């Protein structure tokens, strides 16, 4: 039971961190700041998903692949 309680605490902390990051995006006043905040949010989300994959939650693997490559292609295939 202790493991479950600890995991719930981790999830709550992660959700709080992601929520704070989203509030930062909403508060951004220019494009450069918005882009920086979105990039930070995606990095946090990627780490959260990766951690949960390590904890045995493979259903998150598709969500992580979208964060890593949202366009579905690599940069060399994107138009300049």
Image (cartoon, rainbow, N blue to C red):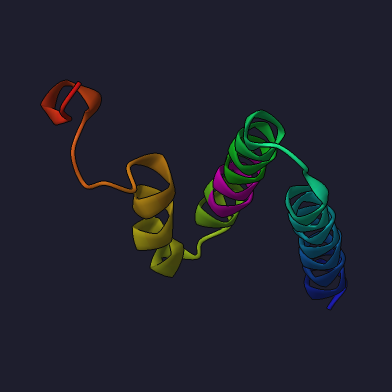
To which quarter of the image does residue 4 belong? bottom right
Please determine whether, in this image, residue 58 is positioned above or below residue 68: below
In the image: residue 23, left or right of residue 43: right
Q: Check residue 7 for magenta coloring.
A: no
Q: Which residue is pictured at 51% across the width and 61% down the height?
A: 56
Q: Residue furthest front?
A: 30
Give residue 35's position: percent from left, percent from top: 60, 35
Query: Would residue 23 appear left or right of 77 to someone viewing this image?
Result: right
Magenta span covers which residues? 44-49
The residue shown at (41%, 60%) is 63
**Above or below — where is 71 with respect to 1?**
above
Residue 43 at x, y percent in the picture: 60, 38
Answer with the quarter of the image where residue 77 lies.
top left
Q: Residue furthest bottom?
A: 1
Q: At which x and y percent is residue 41?
A: 66, 45
Foreground of the two, 9 or 62: 62
Q: Is residue 47 magenta?
A: yes
């Amino acid at each position: 039971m202790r493991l479950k309680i600890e995991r719930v605490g981790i999830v709550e902390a992660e959700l709080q961190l992601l929520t704070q990051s989203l509030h930062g995006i909403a508060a951004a006043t220019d494009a450069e700041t918005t882009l920086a905040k979105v990039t930070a949010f995606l990095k946090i989300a990627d780490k959260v998903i990766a951690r949960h994959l390590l904890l045995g939650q493979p259903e998150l693997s598709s969500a992580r692949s979208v964060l890593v490559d949202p366009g579905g292609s690599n940069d060399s295939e994107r138009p300049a």
